[in-house]
Amino acid sequence: MTSVEYVRMICKERGIAVSKLESDLGFGNGYLNPKKLKKLPLEKAMDISEYLKIDVFTLIDDEDTKALLSSDEPTYKIPVLGRVAAGIPISAIEEILDWEELPKYMKNQGTFFGLRIKGDSMEPGICNGDTVIVKEQSNAEDGQIVIALVNGDDGVCKRLKLYENGTIALMSDNPAYPPMYFNSTEVDNVPVRIVGVVKELRRKF
């Protein structure tokens, strides 16, 4: 059984539509077609493992990648920030609450930082006090969880929804919080700016 077939099996067992997983993670409709996709890229495997709360090793077919993940390769540290603010480069923010370690190989995949979550708008998946590992980037795909700056305020953690007419929505997973909609003009004028995509959740007890 390939990793793609395994993901589809887990979805079936849990009553999760594969199309919903694809949409929520921004993969595109039909991405997890076992006839077309034989191996999951590492980044996609990590996204799915977090979404389904399963061990990422069960989603990796390549033995070299498994060996890399399980090795004692040195790690590097990234700062955990208490806020991301407009006009302040992430590298210049001094409010460092903690440090997290990432595998050394991730250093070649982009710039990462940690962010301490405040509030309950992304519950039940992401809770107040959790730390999310964020890949710094200015764009994102539909369904991804992003850190966005709105109207110069501190960054918010929301799920991104894209519409064909250029409208976007920043969605809370907690239904108690209504979506924030912005048309294409408002995205430029408010402004709304994506600063990163959430790649991992870390919770300490």
Image (spheres, grey):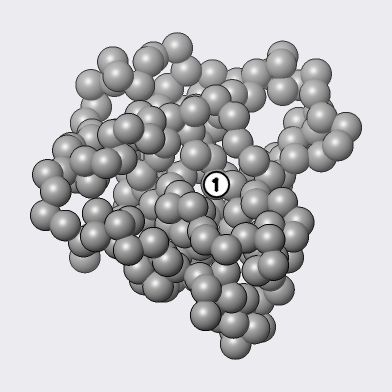
User: What count of labels does the image hold?
Assistant: 1
- From the viewer's perspective, tell me whether residue 178 is left or right of residue 47: right
- Dot 1, crowdedness within 10 Å: few (<14), some or many (≥20)? many
Q: Is residue 61 visible?
A: yes
Quadrant of residue 62 within the rendered picture: bottom left
- From the viewer's perspective, tell me whether residue 61 is left or right of residue 69: right
Give the residue number, with chain letter if any, for mark 1.
145
Q: What residue is rendered at 60% in x and 87% in y?
A: 13
Q: Is residue 185 above or below residue 16?
A: above
Q: What residue is rendered at 28% in x and 34% in y?
A: 107
Q: Is residue 85 above or below residue 112?
A: above
Quadrant of residue 64 within the rendered picture: bottom left
* Quadrant (top left, top right, bottom left, bottom right) of the C terminus: bottom left
Task: Say which element carries label 1.
Answer: strand
Q: What residue is rendered at 76% in x and 21% in y?
A: 186
Q: Is residue 193 above or below residue 162?
A: above
- From the viewer's perspective, tell me whether residue 155 is left or right of residue 21: left
Residue 139: x, y in percent? 59, 29
Q: Nearer the viewer, residue 134 or 43?
A: 43
Q: Is residue 82 visible?
A: no
Residue 37: x, y in percent? 62, 60
Q: Farthest residue toward the right? A: 165
Q: Nearer the viewer, residue 4 or 149?
A: 4
Residue 122: x, y in percent? 52, 55
Tell me the amino acid under the disc marked 1.
Answer: Ile
